Amino acid sequence: MTLGNSSFELFAFWFPYNDSFHFWQILTYMFMHSHQGITHIFFNMLLLFMLGSPLEYTIGQKKFLFLYFSAGFGALALQLLFYYIQFQPGYQSFLQAGFGKDQILEFLRTGQYSSVILQYTTEDSVNNMFKAYFSHMVGASGAVSGIIAGFGILYWNRPLHLLFIPFPVKAKYLMAFYFVPDLIGGITGQSLYGTTNIAHWAHIGGAIIGFITMWYWKKNSFNDKRWY
């Protein structure tokens, strides 16, 4: 599936200062897919099918949907926080230099700014501001991360038979294999996957929501027969 530029601008999630941002993107970004290949969406859907199906059967459809969408929103929130941390130092430098908000946004749109700004900040801060301004998010990875974390909490020691792996892997090791590279990539900025366009903090954000939600449900709503 390849997205046209107009669809991408309308339904991907864009940084809120960007002209392409719309409020509905907090939901629609989860159903979009990058035009850079099908490998990412293939593994997302594979994990959603393999882990999501038994999880939905156990906790029920309503709780499963709540878990999925809340993880997607949590993924967006943490990644957006990271973008704001990138954006604010440069933005505040422009304000301190006497530029108004409209002037700053025009600089961001055109990529041109006065060298006087470098008296107040570093070039790295300005570059980070531009990166955040043009950042966008697409994909179900954050929501799927919540499903993986929720499955791991519920079936911590269950052995899983996965494609391409000739031996069973316990759910807790799958969680570590999936999330540790994201944690390293988020902290260091160096992706272990060989690509630089992965929203590592989105994966972590979705996992955190999945972990907390399932831990709470397991602690309070589980008996020896069924979830309620």
Image (tube, rainbow, N blue to C red):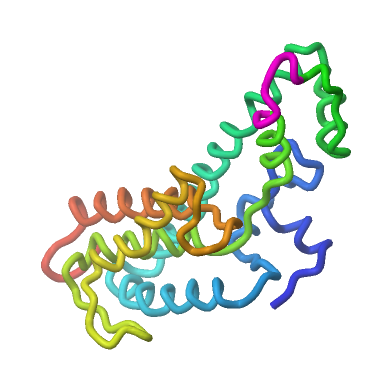
Whether residue 228 is visible here, answered yes or no, is no
Q: Residue at x 46, y 52 (%)?
A: 70
* Residue 162 image-quadrant placement: bottom left
Relative height, residue 182 to residue 194 (above, below): above
Predominant SS of the magenta segment: helix
List x then y, in percent, for residue 196. 58, 56
Q: Residue at x 70, y 48 (%)?
A: 14
Answer with left or right where residue 166 lies relative to residue 96.
left
Instruction: Please name whichever residue, 162 or 93, is drawn nearer the observer in this view of the structure.
Output: 93
Answer with left or right where residue 193 lies relative to residue 209.
right
The span shown in magenta is 118-125
Is 123 part of what is drawn in magenta? Answer: yes
Instruction: Please name whichever residue, 90 or 42, is drawn nearer the observer in this view of the structure.
Output: 90
List x then y, in percent, for residue 95. 75, 16
Q: Residue at x 56, y 76 (%)?
A: 39
List x then y, in percent, for residue 122. 67, 24
Instruction: Please name whichever residue, 222 or 157, is drawn nearer the observer in this view of the structure.
Output: 157
Is 24 part of what is drawn in magenta? Answer: no
Answer with left or right where residue 166 lies relative to residue 121.
left
Q: Quadrant of the N terminus?
A: bottom right
* Residue 102 image-quadrant placement: top right
